[in-house]
Amino acid sequence: MTDKERDELLINMANDMKNVKNDMKNVKNDMKEIKEEQRNLSRTVAKIEVEHGEKLQILLDVVTGQEEKNKEFEKRFEEDEKILDRHSDQIYYLQLKANKRKPIL
């Protein structure tokens, strides 16, 4: 190998090393950007999880409250049906007394 070839080889190697260093800098910058984007994404996901968790809890509370109200209404409805049945029996009995007829059973 001649001195000129050796010098050219060293120059090429030096240029290649500069390119590698530049590429490494670019990779480091890209990694920083990716890490920052990942942090932002993580914050966004955490915020979404909290907001949706709160909304789901509100929906669950509404459903639970509605179920309790429905049970309360069912109980009142059953009580009202009993009262209506008793009144119906009383009316039937009073009508029988007023007409002085024997009940047809």
Image: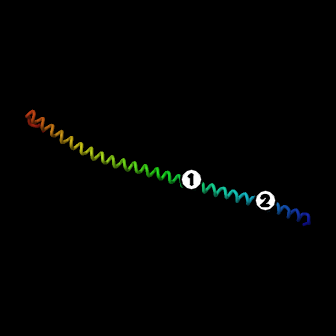
Question: Residue 36's spot in the image, x, y percent?
Answer: 63, 56
Image position, residue 84 (x, y; %): 21, 40
Rendered view: 7 above or below 102: below
Residue that appears at 53% across and 53% down: 47
Q: CA distance from mark 2 to mark 1?
A: 37 Å
Rendered image: mark on residue 19: 2
Q: Is 29 situated left or right of 59 in this image?
A: right
Q: What's the residue type where badge 1 is placed?
A: Thr
- Identified at 14% across, 37% down, the residue is 92
Q: Quadrant of residue 11?
A: bottom right
Q: Is residue 104 above or below residue 36?
A: above
Q: Tell me, for residue 74, which label it has, or none.
A: none
Dot 1 corresponds to which residue? 44
Seen from this angle, which residue lies furthest top? 99
Give the class, few, some or many, for how many residues have Cα within 10 Å of label 1's Cα (few <14, many ≥20): few
State which quadrant residue 9 falls in. bottom right
Reply above or below: 34 against 100: below
On screen, residue 82 versus residue 14, left or right, reads left
In x, y percent, where is residue 83?
A: 21, 43
What's the residue type where badge 2 is placed? Asn
In the rendered structure, the answer to whether residue 18 lies left or right of residue 77 reads right
Quadrant into which the C terminus falls: top left
Q: Position of residue 59 (x, y in %)?
A: 43, 49
User: Who is closer to the viewer here, 80 or 103?
Assistant: 80
Write the residue at 60% across / 54% down: 40
Q: Nearer the viewer, residue 101 or 83?
A: 83
Q: Secondary structure at mark 1?
A: helix
